[in-house]
Image (cartoon, rainbow, N blue to C red):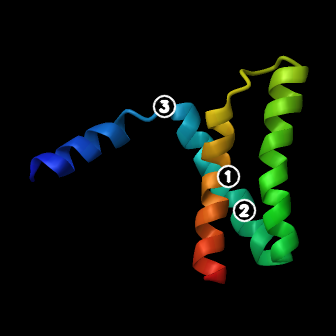
Amino acid sequence: MDIKNKRMLNRLSNIDKDKLLHFFWGTIMSFCLIWMFNITGLIISLIIPAIKELYYDKYLGKGKCEFMDYIYSIAPTIMITIIKYI
């Protein structure tokens, strides 16, 4: 294995569990919503994680509101949209 691959695998292995969970649940949510509602599901998939971060984490104080949590949650939405519509 060359050095570039080792660096990439090292970076991937250092991703926080919290971010991976956001990515996982974002994948499940966006796949289901886009599959059932098309463009409307896409929009909903972008809004729900924002509401979760702002309302549940920040307003209610039941978690830590982080912008990167939102990014990891919507990354699957962007990926699924690219695969489906382009």
Q: Earlier in the sequence, mark 1 or mark 2?
A: 2
Give the SS element for disc 2: helix
- Amino acid at dot 2: Ser
In x, y percent, where is residue 50? 81, 42
Which corner quadrant of the image does residue 36 belong to? bottom right
Query: x%, y% of residue 61?
Result: 84, 17
**28 horizontally vs 53: left or right:** left
Q: CA distance from mark 1 to mark 2?
A: 8 Å
The residue where tag 1 is placed is 74
Say which amino acid is labelled 1: Ile
Residue type at tag 3: Asp
Q: Is residue 55 above or below residue 5?
A: above
According to the picture, the residue beneath numbered tag 3 turns out to be 16
Lower sequence index among marks 3 and 2: 3
| Residue of label 2 | 30
Find numbered disc 3 in the image and state the secondary structure of the residue it sits on.
loop
Q: Nearer the viewer, mark 1 or mark 2?
A: 1
* Mark before the other along the chain sequence, 1 or 3: 3
Which residue is painted at 60% across and 73% down in the image? Answer: 82
The single residue placed furthest to the front in the displayed view is 86
> Rounded to the nearest whole Å, what is the CA distance between mark 1 and mark 3?
16 Å
Neighbor class of circle 2 (other Cα within 10 Å; few <14, some 14-19, many 20+) is many
